[in-house]
């Protein structure tokens, strides 16, 4: 069967798409998707319909579907904004809108332009240097007595569990264990794995049993050159190894959330502007976004916009742009706070339209609702982020801070502690300590509140709101000298800082907590 639309001829029998300049290359999944859409031209098809037709109904991520749609659109000259052929029907699915005519088959002009994915992996990784980062987790190497009750099973079970949990990170493409476990962990070289599986990163590990102890070492390597990106070592009793597995998996997932973007940004920084792709721009944006000053926030926004100019369906770039609008409103870098928050929510919504299961997008929507004063909606979005990624430290801390606002300090402390345990080197570490300090003010434990608030204010990147929390906590604990020192630091950096700004940033519903902070700040001269 063949169909003509626009300047294209699509042949299902010859597995070929011919455009005005000749045959067009398409990966198998994108080709099958295009055939399915053309067969149903004019009709809206849901994502479930697409998955049933293209992937045989097996479980695939939304980002996998989005990648196939993007490739099909690119092949026919469409994009995320110019949807003259394949149109997204938001919240429903897709519709092939170009006029289609069935034509008589013609002799093939070239051989087939796609081939099935090599090996057993049904979802091949993107080529190195394009789209998402990609990772292969190899079986861990066991070093110890072969007859041991724990060693060999954990050497397979732990990386399998890592694959299952890492696959929930929408921004990271994880190779199925059926492919990555075929490599011998003792002899496989990162370059070999990269060549055969087309990945950017390789995770390896060792399991060493000595006496009643077991030590698990994990390394994340750059596949291109074998450079070490991250490593960690865990030791536990043999009898407790299965209890420790959960901690190891959570810590590893969180570490990758921090170290892979950092490594990607460092790589992108060395590229010329002409070499930067959407992925590189995104990670350069992340490099600047956590500095919480107007200049870096503008640079971050510029990189996210550049990423979207190259790929309108890059969900995380929309989410990153939402972060910059939110930061402008939170830090009062712009005049129209309400408009900035509307734009923050709009950008987060655009990200969620593309990838409804992206925890970073849900997180940014939750924070936009927080600053808009809709804490209940904020909780729903933060819970959604944590449902997708239970190890998302920043979502745990933000939920804890919002628990402070509604007068639940015990839950707030639990969320802050969870965030700190998951990500002890997080770029928002100061905010995690700050949330915990505010929770201690809620329980009238002013001494611990002061210690935590001052610790927060001394962390790298801490902004003036954190210093205001420290000033208030010192005042409540009777340390007037410390309170005045932090007050003076606030005034030196933000002379306009005042009570109205503080309570717009922190919409505290709990009346007693509001009274404590308001009274302390008034006594320190904040108007």
Image (spheres, rainbow, N blue to C red):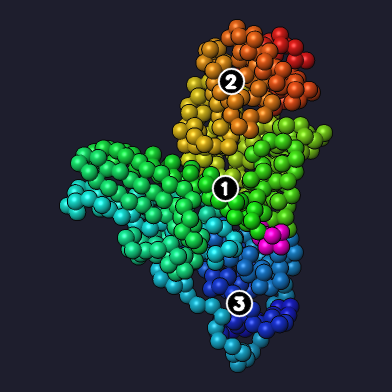
User: Nearest the camera: 231 or 301?
Assistant: 231
Residue 8 location (% of width, % of height): 69, 80
**Relative to residue 509, is residue 133 depicted above or below?**
below
**Relative to residue 415, is residue 52 depicted above or below?**
below
Side (left or right) of 156 relative to 231: left
**Relative to residue 518, is residue 182 depicted above or below?**
below
Residue 448 location (% of width, % of height): 52, 16
Viewport quadrant of the N terminus:
bottom right
Residue 74 location (% of width, % of height): 67, 69
Real-space Cα separation, disc 1 to disc 2, in angstroms: 27 Å
Which residue does the numbered mark 1 point to in the structure image?
A: 262
Q: Quadrant of residue 103?
A: bottom right
**Relative to residue 159, is residue 129 depicted above or below?**
below
User: Nearest the camera: 470 or 307?
Assistant: 470
Which residue does the numbered mark 3 point to in the structure image?
A: 25
Secondary structure found at label 1? helix
**Residue stretch in magenta:** 272-278
Real-space Cα separation, disc 2 to disc 3, in angstroms: 59 Å
Q: Magenta span has 276? A: yes
Secondary structure found at label 2? helix
Question: Which residue appears at 29% of the width and 38% of the height?
Answer: 236
Side (left or right) of 143 relative to 1: left
Q: Quadrant of residue 487?
A: top right
């Amino acid at each position: 069967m063949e169909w003509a639309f626009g300047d294209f001829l699509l042949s299902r029998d010859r597995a070929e798409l011919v455009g005005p300049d000749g045959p067009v290359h398409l990966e198998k999944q994108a080709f099958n998707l295009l055939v399915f859409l053309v067969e149903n031209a004019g009709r809206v098809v849901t994502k479930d319909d697409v998955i049933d037709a293209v992937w045989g109904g097996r479980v695939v991520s939304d980002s996998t579907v989005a990648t196939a749609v993007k490739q099909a659109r690119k092949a026919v000259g469409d994009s995320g904004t110019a949807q003259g052929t394949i149109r997204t029907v938001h919240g429903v699915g897709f519709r092939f809108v170009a006029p289609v005519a069935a034509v008589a088959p013609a002799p093939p002009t070239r051989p087939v332009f796609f081939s099935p994915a090599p090996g057993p992996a049904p979802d091949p990784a993107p080529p190195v240097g394009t789209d998402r980062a990609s990772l292969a987790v190899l079986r861990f190497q066991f070093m110890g007595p072969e007859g041991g009750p724990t060693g060999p099973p954990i050497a397979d079970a732990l990386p399998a569990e890592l694959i299952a949990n890492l696959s929930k990170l929408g921004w990271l493409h994880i190779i199925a264990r059926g492919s990555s476990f075929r490599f011998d962990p003792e002899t496989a070289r990162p370059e070999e794995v990269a060549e055969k599986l087309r990945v950017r990163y390789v995770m390896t590990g060792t399991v060493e049993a000595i006496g009643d102890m077991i030590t698990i070492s994990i390394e994340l390597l750059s596949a291109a050159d074998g450079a070490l990106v991250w490593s960690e070592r865990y030791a536990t009793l043999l009898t407790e190894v299965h209890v420790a597995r959960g901690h190891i998996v959570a810590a590893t997932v969180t570490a990758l959330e921090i170290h892979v973007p950092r490594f990607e940004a460092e790589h992108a920084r060395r590229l010329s502007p002409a070499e930067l792709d959407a992925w590189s721009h995104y990670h350069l944006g992340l490099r600047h976004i956590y500095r919480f000053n107007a200049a870096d926030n503008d640079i971050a926004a510029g990189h996210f916009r550049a990423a979207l100019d190259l790929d309108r369906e890059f969900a995380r770039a929309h989410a990153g742009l939402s972060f910059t609008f939110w930061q402008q409103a939170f830090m009062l870098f712009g005049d129209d706070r309400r408009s900035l928050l509307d734009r923050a929510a709009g950008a987060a919504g655009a990200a969620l339209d593309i990838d409804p299961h992206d925890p970073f997008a849900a997180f940014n929507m939750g924070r936009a609702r927080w600053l808009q004063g809709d804490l209940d909606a904020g909780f729903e979005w933060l819970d959604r982020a944590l449902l997708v990624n239970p190890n998302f430290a920043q979502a745990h801390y933000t939920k804890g801070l919002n628990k402070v606002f509604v007068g639940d300090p015990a839950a707030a402390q639990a969320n802050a502690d969870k965030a700190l345990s998951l990500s002890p080197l997080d770029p928002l570490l100061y905010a995690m300590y700050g949330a915990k300090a505010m929770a201690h003010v809620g329980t009238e434990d002013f001494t611990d509140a002061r210690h935590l608030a001052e610790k927060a204010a001394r962390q790298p990147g801490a902004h003036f709101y954190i210093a205001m929390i420290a000033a208030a906590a010192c005042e409540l604990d009777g340390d007037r000298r410390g309170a005045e020192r932090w007050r003076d630091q606030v005034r030196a950096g933000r002379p306009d800082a005042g009570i109205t700004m503080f309570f717009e940033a922190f919409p505290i519903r709990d009346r007693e907590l509001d009274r404590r902070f308001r009274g302390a700040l008034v006594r320190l001269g904040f108007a």
